[in-house]
Image: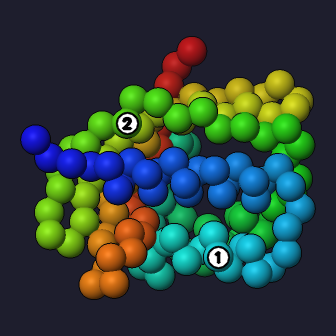
Amino acid sequence: MTDYTEYFDEVIQAHEAIERWFAVAQDEAELERLLTRFSPRFCMVSPLGRVLDFEALRALFQMAGGKKSGFRIALSELHGIAIHEHGATVSYREQQTDASGLHTDRRSTVVFEKLASGQIIWLHLHETFCSV
């Protein structure tokens, strides 16, 4: 049996950090710590089909930091797709809510790169909205 634990842990820990970033105003140093989870070659396909690179992700985080009162992320359905010497691909379901009552539900697939240091970084993320 293939063990995806360290990749699932990264999904969970990254989303905890993202949840804090969006919900609570923090300093620039915290943003830089959050961004170290992502490859400089990071690419994300948003649920609406928009493609964001690392700099667009940085801009998104800078714009929204501390501005989503009550923001919460619930993760489920973590599933390993492929694992190899230099990383893994996993999928998960992500439900977001905030104090205004806005709720989104999405399925995501992430490609991770595992650096020689052992650090796991996000290389590619593809999100798709789930119909309610």
Q: Would residue 66 be found to the left or right of residue 111 on screen?
A: right
To which residue does mark 2 refer? 78
To which residue does mark 1 refer? 33
Q: Please, is residue 91 above or below residue 118 in the view?
A: above
Q: Amino acid at mark 2?
A: Leu
Total count of labels:
2
**What residue lies at 59% left-to-right and 50% top-to-bottom?**
15
Q: In terms of secondary structure, where does tag 1 sit?
A: helix
Pick the quarter of the image with the C terminus. Answer: top right
**What residue lies at 34% left-to-right and 84% top-to-bottom?**
117
Counting residues from the N terminus, which is met first, the one under dot 2 or under dot 1? 1
42, 77: nearer the viewer: 77
- Tell me, yes or no, if residue 56 can be seen here: no
Q: In terms of secondary structure, where does tag 2 sit?
A: strand
Q: Quadrant of residue 41?
A: bottom left
Q: Residues within 10 Å of mark 1 (few under 14, many from 20)?
A: few
